[in-house]
Image (cartoon, grey):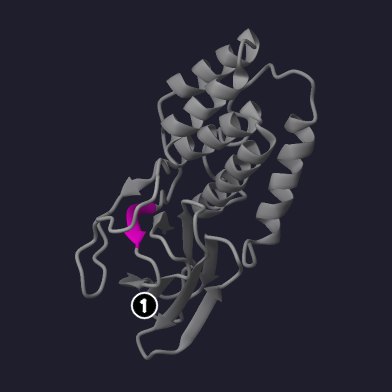
Amino acid sequence: MKSISNKTQFMCSLVMSAFLCSTAYAGETNVLTEKSDGSDQSMTAIEQASLASQLADYGRDARSAIAFLLAGEIVSSIGAVEAEFTKAGEASDSKKTEDKATGFDFSAEELFAQARNLAGSNEQLLAAIEVAASKESKGLVGSPATHEDSVRAGRTDVYTLEYEGGRPAEILVIGDGDTDLDLTVYDEDDNFICDDDDSTDTMYCEWRPRWTGEFRIEIKNLGDVYNDYVFMTN
């Protein structure tokens, strides 16, 4: 993904080398996300969600239960708040018109379920998954707003949201993997702010507004079927 920060990429590489190359999994099951007070968090909630998405992608490709376990822990710890954002020109819903199998789910519950499926008969790993899944999510300071929706083939979903001046603004969009999505952000005067237009459907943009105002977020579907996505922002 083009715009993901170097910090996130480094953390993902660190996780891979520290856990996925090991021959057994034991010990603490919340090593990535559990902090004593939250004041020493080096990654924002949106960056942690991006890391979880990368781990889930790795888990699917490598059939790694550990990757899904870690992704589930991160998503659980973020404590995202569900939000209903209204799309320009139509109500936000997930009405489907094309014939496509779905099943896309980025919830902690689904990530833990994937981990269980891949753990097989590994009792130690299964026990670690159950411990992680049973923990109550406390959430990070500044938990992101999360909105689930669907963009139809060849269409562009448009949202207008207000961000506070002088504070970092972040957007993460995670698609269902079936089409290429592009993300573009403009300010209230139609000035280009940032974009992520690589060939994937996982997109990230960050900027620091100079004043409080509205910004237009466009999510464009370049494929020939709809794409279910999760939209996270701070």
Q: Position of residue 222 (x, y in %)?
A: 48, 70
Q: Nearer the viewer, residue 208 or 224?
A: 224
**Quadrant of the image containing the C terminus:** bottom left
- Residue 178 in sight here: yes
**Quadrant of the image containing the N terminus:** bottom right
Amino acid type of the residue that numbered disc 1 sits on in the rendered structure: Arg
Q: Horizontally, is 4 left or right of 45 in the view? A: right
**Residue at the spot 40% in from the left edge and 45% down from the top edge:** 101
Q: Horizontally, is 233 left or right of 31 in the view? A: left
Snapshot quadrant of residue 6: bottom right
- Residue 40 in sight here: no
Residue linked to disc 1: 216
Q: Nearer the viewer, residue 25 or 212?
A: 25
- Dominant secondary structure of the magenta stretch? strand
Q: Nearer the viewer, residue 182 or 83?
A: 182
Q: Nearer the viewer, residue 42 or 114?
A: 114
Above/below status of 229 relative to 183: above
Magenta region, residue range:
145-151
**Residue at the spot 50% in from the left edge and 50% down from the top edge:** 45
Count of numbered circles on the image: 1
Secondary structure under badge 1? strand
Q: Position of residue 128 (x, y in %)?
A: 58, 17
Above/below status of 43 relative to 188: above
**Residue at the spot 54% in from the left edge and 22% down from the top edge:** 117
Q: Is residue 146 magenta?
A: yes
Q: Position of residue 210 (x, y in %)?
A: 46, 81
